[in-house]
Amino acid sequence: MNTTTVPTTLSEQQLIAGLPAGFRWGVATSAYQIEGAIDVDGRTPSIWDTFCRVPGAIDNGDTGDIACEHYTRMPADVALIKDLGLDTYRFSVSWTRIQPHGTGPVNPAGLAFYDRLVDELLAQGIDPWVTLYHWDLPQELEDAGGWPVRDTAYRFADYSMLVFDALSDRVDTWTTLNEPWCSAMLGYAYGAHAPGRQEFPAAVSAVHHLLLGHGLATERMREAAPRKLDIGITLNAATAYPASDAEPDLEAARRADGMGARLYLDPLVHGRYPADVIDDLAAQGIEIPVQEGDLASISTPIDVLGINYYFSQKFTGFDENGRTTDDDGLPISRTLPLNKPRTAMDWEIVPEGFTDLLVRISKDYPGLPMVVTENGSAFQDVPDENDYVADADRTAYFTSHLAAVARAINEGADIRGYLAWSLLDNFEWAYGYDKRFGIVRVDYESQARTPKQSALYLKELAEQHRNL
Ligand code: IFM
């Protein structure tokens, strides 16, 4: 008997082809990772310039001193985005170009670079998306205590307004902070990022002051907005899977989700810190330094939530010996492999974790439009004699993760666009230049740019989608 097989699941390509009309296609970068020109036009050191000078802090002793020379090559880089047919470019502004001392009046020479960049993008028909803070705190503000100090939040709001006043006549979309988890935890708890401190209580204070800075800046930008603008924040988040249904595993996943996602999303959306995280911190003698009015500022409504996604993890609450607490009586939290292929960052490739994350955010924090403001992967690229990289691995990563986004949309998540990380190979923070995330190869000797297979693939997808 002949039977007709009705396909019950869509292929990744079918899912991507079904992305909604008006979906944004773009690419993202950040100032310190690409600009170079660290001491021109009045720029002074940020915490990253300082951290790069700490022996052993960065692989190979790399620094952002030169990076991709984007500061001088900007028009050609914008032309590259145009050639790739992408409609949105998300970039960050270097605070110490705008305010060399972290406070005080604007530095016109530093601002002029971003003014030119915005004009260049608009001239090429590319939508500029400004991120105000991508980790490069003025060193002078760190010397005054950094993000663990409340005053830094007010300094951030002042700086934001200098940029906003200058560019909001032409820029429609604004992100206050990129990945505050990284600024707070990698910078102040684990010491892996600038400023390299390892003080967990200070990191918790940093979380609050970053969020307060976001809130204060958002309130002021909203009030000064010359027209309807989209203002938001970008979080890095992931799905925390429990290793089993055993209570300690469920608890370990809950704690990871609490510290990684809900500690940010709950105050931003619901105007309160999650009770279970407050309890976990209190058990360690740590209090979040909330003052009256802070949570109202922090929960000022946003127009867009940026989500940066790279991988998900599985958590267990047992150590190798089956114990559930350590010598200090604190609960064990460990990651276990999901047994997936990995990128050059040693991050497991978990696109289903992306779908689960997006669907879950849309359910727990409804009514919040999301854009994927970063997603991408580093692999060991092998260029041919023309410097072309046939990066099938990165291309496959984009395919599976775009399909994951489409699945989330099909399950009801409101996701408005996808910005690949990153336009160029660049300075990957503590990993230096070895880890390449670019869709465009950079030869750091010659500074030549060569689009990789993944760039041509995204170009094709954006083009097909536009023509639907
Ligand atoms: O390169 C970083 C970026 O600066 C922030 N999000 C993660 C990327 C890859 O690690």
Image (tube, helix red, strand yellow):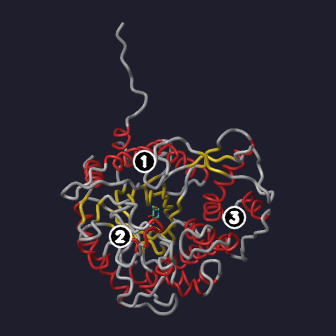
Q: Residue furthest top?
A: 1
Secondary structure of the residue carrying numbered label 3: loop
Asked whether 264 or 188 is in front, the reply is: 188
Q: Compare marks 2 and 3 and give the one earlier in the sequence.
A: 2
Please name which of the two marks, 1 or 3, marks the residue nearer to the observer.
1
Please name which of the two marks, 1 or 2, marks the residue nearer to the observer.
1
Task: Name the residue at 45% across, 67% down.
Answer: 59
Q: Which residue is label 2 attached to?
A: 128
Residue 291 drawn at (x, y percent): 72, 77
Bin the neighbour count of mark 2 within 10 Å (Cα to Cα): few under 14, some 14-19, many 20 and up.
Answer: many
Q: Which residue is label 3 attached to?
A: 272
| Residue 125 visible at all | yes
Q: Which residue is label 1 attached to?
A: 401
| Residue 228 visible at all | no
- Residue 181 lies, with reference to residue 359, above or below; the image says below
Marks 1 and 3, Cα distance to the nearest angstrom?
Answer: 31 Å
Secondary structure of the residue carrying numbered label 2: strand
Task: Name the residue at 64% across, 71% down.
Answer: 198
> Does label 3 point to a residue whose CB lies under 8 Å from ligand 1?
no
